[in-house]
Image (cartoon, rainbow, N blue to C red):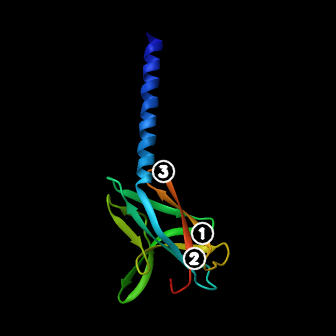
Amino acid sequence: MAAAWTRTVTAVLLWGAVLLSDIAIAHTATLAVQDAWIRAVPGANVAAAYLTLRNTGAQPVTVTGVRTSAAAQAMIHETVVENGLARMRPHEHVIVPAGSTVKLQPGGLHVMLQGLARPLVVGQTVPLELLLSNGDSLQVTATVRPLNGA
């Protein structure tokens, strides 16, 4: 009797783990990244990355951070205008509502790359890793564009 109970509990726990892993995979798969690019600023040790986040799922997805091997630090920032002056401030996370799109673009939300490992070259690609609130991450490749963003 005890062996049967142990097998039943083990089976339930394994089934639960499979279901949870499927939910996590589905959660990540619902977030798509489009048009990821970085503005090259000649001679600067910082750069800004922009991208479009599209959530095709039925639940919101939260991006809690960014990592990259191209810089010492990557942070989500927001440009805000206060008293006629544009200022950047850290933005803790980005929530992409279900079925919605959020754009990280010049003059608004963006990823600030500080302490670049080497100067960026127009045309090169830079790996970014978006960290999600459920513990998953999403690998993204951003292309370096010239200062005018063209």
Q: Position of residue 148 (x, y in %)?
A: 51, 87
**Label 2 SS:** strand
Q: Amino acid at mark 3?
A: Gly
Q: Amino acid at mark 2?
A: Val
Q: Disc 1 designates what residue? A: 126
At x 46%, y 56%, the residue is 132
Q: Disc 3 designates what residue? A: 135
Q: Position of residue 81 (x, y in %)?
A: 37, 84
Total labels drawn: 3
At x 43%, y 65%, the residue is 92
At x 43%, y 9%, the residue is 1
Q: Residues within 10 Å of mark 2 (few under 14, many from 20)?
A: many
Q: Give yes or no for contact between labels 1 and 3 (Cβ–Cβ under 8 Å).
A: no
Q: Is residue 94 left or right of residue 49?
A: left
The mark nearer the N terminus, 1 or 3, is 1
At x 35%, y 88%, the residue is 83
Q: Residues within 10 Å of mark 3 (few under 14, many from 20)?
A: few
